[in-house]
Amino acid sequence: MATVTKLLVFVVENHSLDQMRSAMPFTRGLAERYGYADHYEAITHPSLPNYLAIAGGDTFGIRDDGSPAAHPLGGASIFGRALRHGGTARLYAESMGRPCQTVPAGDYAVKHNPWAYFAEETALCRRDDVSFSSFGSDVARGDLPEIGMVVPDLCDDAHDCALSRADAWLRSAVGRAMSGPDWASGHLAIVITADEDDNHHGNRILTVVAHPALHHVVVSRPLSHDALSRAYAAVARVAPLRHAAEAPDLLEAFGLAAA
């Protein structure tokens, strides 16, 4: 069983499994080459509670896309828990003007940046919730974090623009990650998922898991963002948060093991 020490997650917006497979040829190609889950469902609607489920193992009862000022959360995120246990964590947000920005601006949507909502981790968030502009240098140095998330802006994540735009952006960003030493060493697993569907397909979304040891794997067991949150915890070597403790581990479902 291949061992993973770093997990990097890319999140796109508001499209179903079938929509993503039909309109995102690069992403579909990764799914077919490495692996994908064909019964993976988002937790709810709208966007924000799904991001919080990935980062915190819970929706915290939130049913809207309100700002961090409207929804200051207590307790730990998976990013903060990893850091406080001696690990590394980083979130890369495209078009964000300053670290851990808590208000939307331009194409930056704070509702897609879950770490900004965890009020007890503000100092950690301001250090490691950073602009996407630092992503390339982290890749080149082999300095990707143990648990990482990449959040494209509102156009590149297919929220406001076409899926073809998001697919082209992923071709560049995921391709860059795969060019670095973390991928070449076999330490890095990459996940591409959506926050939710378009409200018309039962919230079933395409979730791709890429690792050099995977070849044409299709996982049909029911999975959700809680399983992704549990995989983050396993890679960070910390206890899973909230509902993630009751979920299967996404990486284990694909035959991968956290170190």
Image (cartoon, rainbow, N blue to C red):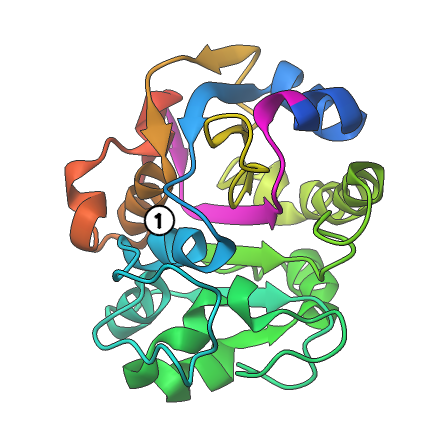
Question: Which x, y percent locates residue 39?
Answer: 42, 19
Question: Which x, y percent locates residue 16?
Answer: 59, 29
Amino acid type shown at disc 1: Tyr
Quadrant housing the C terminus: top left
Would residue 248 appear left or right of 171 to someone viewing this image?
left
Question: Which x, y percent locates residue 181?
Answer: 64, 47
| The residue positioned farthest toward the front in the image shown | 200
Work out whether residue 177 or residue 79 is closer to the camera in this orientation and state it: 79
Range of magenta residues: 1-18
Q: Is residue 189 above or below residue 169?
A: above
Residue at 43%, 70% (x, y): give it.
Answer: 115
Q: Which residue is mark 1?
A: 232
Q: Is residue 223 above or below residue 111?
A: above
Residue at 16%, 44% (x, y): give it.
Answer: 245
Q: Secondary structure at mark 1?
A: helix
Quadrant housing the N terminus: top left
Q: Is residue 15 above or below residue 142?
A: above
Residue at 58%, 83% (x, y): give it.
Answer: 103
Would residue 219 appear left or right of 33 to someone viewing this image?
left
Asked whether residue 110 appears in the rendered view, the answer is yes
Q: Is residue 220 above or below residue 47?
A: above
Give the quadrant of residue 114.
bottom left
Work out whether residue 54 or residue 148 is closer to the camera in this orientation and state it: 54
Give the quadrant of residue 130.
bottom right
Give the quadrant of residue 110.
bottom right
Q: Is residue 26 magenta?
A: no
Question: Which x, y percent locates residue 227?
Answer: 32, 37
Work out whether residue 112 or residue 133 is closer to the camera in this orientation and state it: 112
Would residue 157 appear left or right of 227 to someone viewing this image?
right
Q: Is residue 2 magenta?
A: yes
